[in-house]
């Protein structure tokens, strides 16, 4: 898998230039961090969840807002976006899988 990753990086750099892909952004394996989301893969499928430090910050922010009894409109909007992203993303993914398997069974 590591060899395939290096081949892909070389191809991208050949096409787009030597700075197109940073080495620190290259990763392969059964556990990856992509844009702050932990992705863990297995033979059964995969699991996605926000990074633990992000979840801790979100919980702390919610606790502070509850203790104060107020939440600014902008902060409320950001929090709603953070919390709904995962649910809506996974819901769409599950529907796509259902449709795909339903078509295979037909």
Image (spheres, helix red, strand yellow):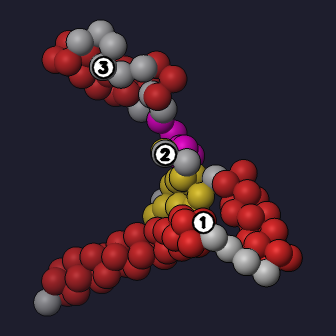
Q: Quick one: SS at disc 1?
A: helix
Quadrant of the frame with the N terminus: top left
* C-alpha separation, residue under disc 1 versus residue under disc 3: 35 Å
* C-alpha separation, residue under disc 2 versus residue under disc 3: 17 Å
**Residue position for label 1:** 75
Along the polypeptide, which appears first: circle 2 or circle 3? 3
Q: Classify residue 96 by image quadrant.
A: bottom left
Along the polypeptide, which appears first: circle 1 or circle 3? 3
Q: Classify residue 65 by image quadrant.
A: bottom right
Q: Which residues, given as a range, are shown in magenta?
A: 28-33
- Residue 53 lies in magenta, yes or no? no
* C-alpha separation, residue under disc 1 versus residue under disc 2: 21 Å
- Residue 31 lies in magenta, yes or no? yes
Quadrant of the frame with the C terminus: bottom left
**Image coordinates for residue 33, horizontal then vertical, percent:** 54, 44
Residue shown at 51% from the left, 39% from the top:
29
Residue shown at 30% from the left, 19% from the top:
20
**Residue position for label 2:** 35
Q: Nearer the viewer, residue 30 or 9?
A: 9
């Amino acid at each position: 898998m590591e060899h395939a990753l290096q081949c892909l990086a070389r191809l991208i750099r050949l096409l787009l230039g030597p700075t197109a892909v940073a080495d620190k952004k290259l990763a392969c394996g059964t556990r990856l961090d992509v844009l702050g989301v932990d992705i863990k893969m297995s033979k059964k499928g995969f699991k996605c969840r926000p990074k633990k430090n992000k979840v801790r910050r979100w919980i702390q922010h919610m606790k502070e807002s509850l203790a104060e009894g107020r939440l600014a409109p902008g902060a409320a909007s950001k929090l709603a976006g953070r919390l709904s992203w995962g649910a809506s993303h996974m819901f769409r993914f599950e529907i796509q899988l259902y449709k795909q398997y339903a078509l295979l069974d037909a």
